[in-house]
Image (cartoon, rainbow, N blue to C red):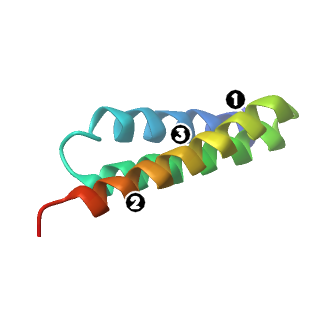
Amino acid sequence: MNAVTLFGVLAVSFMMVMYALEQRHAVFILAFAAGCLLSSVYGFLSGAWPIGVVELIWSGVAVRQYLSRLRSAPT
């Protein structure tokens, strides 16, 4: 297993764990967005640029969801 593949396994694993924890706290949504960014980097590094683009978009969607959750949270 080369370094790029190991990075990809760790990035995608982190992303999926954060996705599973999203309902517990809004910070996990932001962590999921970071995981998507890491997965995007992996996609570009591995030469799978469509995956890199899609993960970049998912990161933006997650940040938007995080901000929406913050706005709707009771104060």
Whether residue 60 is visible to the viewer of this picture, yes or no, is: yes
**In the rendered image, which residue does mark 2 sit on?**
67
User: Measured along the vertical axis of the image, is residue 6 above or below residue 63?
Assistant: above
Q: At 66% from the left edge and 42% from the top edge, which residue is drawn?
A: 57
Residue type at the position of mark 3: Leu
| Quadrant of the rendering where the C terminus is positioned | bottom left
Compare marks 2 and 1 and give the one earlier in the sequence: 1
Report, in whole angstroms, how far the alpha carbon at label 2 lies from the one at label 3. Answer: 26 Å
Q: Secondary structure at mark 3?
A: helix
Tell me if I can see residue 7 in this picture: no
User: Which residue matches tag 3?
Assistant: 10
Q: What secondary structure is marked by label 1?
A: loop
Percent position of residue 44, x then y: 82, 42
Amino acid carrying label 1: it is: Met
Mark 2 vs mark 1: give the one in front: 2
User: In the image, residue 17 lies at what x, y percent?
Assistant: 36, 36
- The Cα atoms of the two marked residues, 2 and 1, are separated by 37 Å
User: What amino acid type is highlighted by mark number 2?
Assistant: Leu
Mark 2 or mark 3, earlier in chain? 3
Which callout, 3 or 1, points at the residue further toward the start of the chain? Answer: 1
Q: Tell us which disc is closer to us: 2 or 3.
A: 2
Give the x, y percent position of residue 9. 57, 33
What is the distance, in whole Å, between disc 3 and disc 1 at their CAs? 12 Å
Q: Residues within 10 Å of mark 1 (few under 14, many from 20)?
A: few
Foreground of the two, 21 or 65: 65
User: Residue at 36% of width from left, 41% of height from top?
Assistant: 18
Q: Are marks 3 and 1 in contact (CB under 8 Å)?
A: no
User: Which residue matches tag 1?
Assistant: 1
Q: Quadrant of the rendered structure where residue 12 is?
A: top right
